[in-house]
Amino acid sequence: MTRPPVRTAPTGAVYFSLLGPLTARLDGHELPLGPRKQRLVLATLLSRPNTPVPVEVLTDAVWPDDPPRTARKNLQVYVSAARTLLGPAGHEGRDRVVHGCGGYLLRIAEGELDTLRFGSLAGAGRAAAGRGDLAGAARLLREALDLWEGPPLNDLRDSAGVAEEAGRLEARCLTVYEDWAETEIELGRPAVAVDGLRDLVERHPLRERLRAAWMNSLHQSGRQAEALAVYDDYRQLMARELGLEPSPAMAALYRSMLGRGREARRPAPAREAVGPAAPPACTAAFTGRPGELRELLEVLGCGEERVVVVSGPAGAGKSALALRAAHLLADRFPDGRVRVRVRREDGTARSRAEILAELGRLCGVAGNAAPPGNAASPEGGAGGDRAATAALADAWQEWQARHRALVVLDDVPDEASVRGLLSRSGKCSVLITARGQLAGLAPVHRIALPALADGEALELLGKLIGAGRLRADPGAALRIVRACGGLPLAVEVSGMRLAVLRHLPLAEYADRLDDPSAALDELVAGDVSVRHRIASGWQDLADGDRWVLGRLAGLAEDGGFTLDRATEALGCGERAAIRAVESLIDAGAVTSPAGESTAHAALYEVPRLLGLYAHEREGV
């Protein structure tokens, strides 16, 4: 079993724990962490390790209502205490807590913080499951869970800011527990998970995946009556609290248990991986896109189109739209709705073998073990590995031919990444999200996501900062969403930032966003950065396309550019300019008119924030 590389802590380093009460230990001895406000600052910094934490976030965590005039000076004292606790200058002689334009950043290694170790073990466990090594996955996931000592930061949750961070940590722990329990059930060891699942369901009664795992563990342990009672309790709770019925997948799991033995081991919810598996960076309620959502529901609901591509720039809300549609189409796809990300966290493309292995694991495809060897290669390696990948592909096609399911392939980098995954027969449908147009795929139904309309963007902003604050200065609010270019991610980040900076007038923030040299610096909220997301899309472009985009971004500042202006700016012939512009349209970096128009008459646009980033990178 391959373990992830561990960044070891320096000898004699302090070990911090957030997965329970905030603690710090040195050589096994617990260290005093000082007064409550000092612990709040330390907890907030540790909750966002190796990431700048804005001063405003720290202030809000310590003084949520009325910070004193000395707040900034007091923070400096608390940060100084944290530096003392961490010891002398860290790796390569750098200070462990540094201050920059983004706020305070705490540098810490995996071996010094339980949440970093937890994430590393959980990731390794999921990777092992993806390779078909269920026993190794169970060991790694259990090792991660052994770090979980109770509700994270339970001694500091009276601070709203810390409570929010603690909630995110607890959600991660719950997801890993669900992964572990389902793996143990799949290994035929359901009894080891029963008691823990019962306790967690009591604390989180509406979390369906936990309940499904508990039902399965009871059922596979021969306790069928108890398993059915768990569903009945859940159905009554849903009706009483929310006025809803359990999901179709949960109902199908219940029906599969009625009057049957233990043979139905695979739970239906394992194919319901359309939401919590990998949420978007921002979590605001779905807003806008009524026309695109309606079109998506009509196309996929009628069953005539088997492949739909939703395209748009990074941060356009493609994943959110796809997940919303998938939830609303539950009754149309009785065999499940599955979401798989086609990129890794660093933005690189996953191999076809990796994707097939995950699809097989989620859908119960026979022969779903990932091939051995080099899984990072496009076909999983050479010789026998290629044969194993081919067998996986054949098994996946067989499964699609016999089922009616919706498969969401999220964040697809290019056509090659999904060829061979699309259904050749049967009633399965595939919903693809991609930044580019994926012009090489046919036949498909295409939906391009434009910028949000002003009204939709204002609605989204209002959900985050409050309708009253929006109404107090509607003109400034409109300037903010337009400075964001109608990009949902940018509007969400603006809203999250303003929700923290409650003292900041909307007009002042609008002025900051209007400044081309500062706009991207302002669009950061905690660990969510618009610049980072745009940079990921920039890396998708070929070198030549980046240079062209840098030149065209300057033309777009006054509302768009024509082909004649592009030809002049690029210093090339008309035919070459057409090809250059259309290459950027295909990549999703330039928008063109919705209706038909000649190349000369069309007015092309570069999204504002992408244009600002292109200026930065190309020095235009």
Image: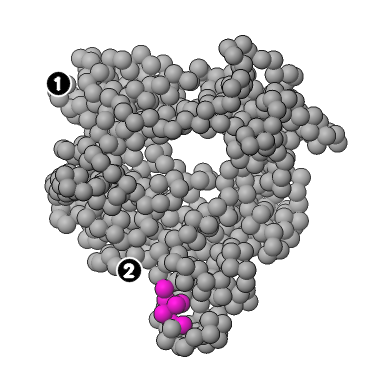
Give the residue displayed 43% in from the left and 55% down from the top: 318
Q: Is residue 185 visible?
A: yes
Label 2 residue SS: loop
85, above or below 383, in the image: above
Q: Nearer the viewer, residue 539 or 93?
A: 93
Q: Earlier in the sequence, mark 1 or mark 2?
A: 1
Q: Is residue 153 above or below residue 526?
A: above
Mark seen at residue 261: 1
Q: Report the coloring of the rendering.
A: one colour
Q: Identify which residue, 237 or 267, lies in the foreground.
A: 267
Point 72% across, 33% down: residue:
64
**Residue 221, placed above or below residue 53:** above
Left or right, residue 427 beside residue 531: left
Please provide percent x and percent y for residue 75.
77, 32
Q: Nearer the viewer, residue 408 or 236?
A: 408
Give the residue furthest to the top: 29
Q: Which quarter of the figure has residue 67?
A: top right
Q: Position of residue 295 (x, y in %)?
A: 36, 61
Identify the residue at image location x=61%, y=16%. 25
* Residue of label 2: 439
Q: Are marks 1 and 2 in contact (CB under 8 Å)?
A: no
Q: Residue furthest front?
A: 92
- Numbered range of the magenta stretch: 577-583
Instruction: Residue type at mark 2: give it.
Output: Ala
- Locate residue 557 relative to residue 230 in the image: left or right: right
- Amino acid under label 1? Gly
Residue 580 among magenta residues: yes
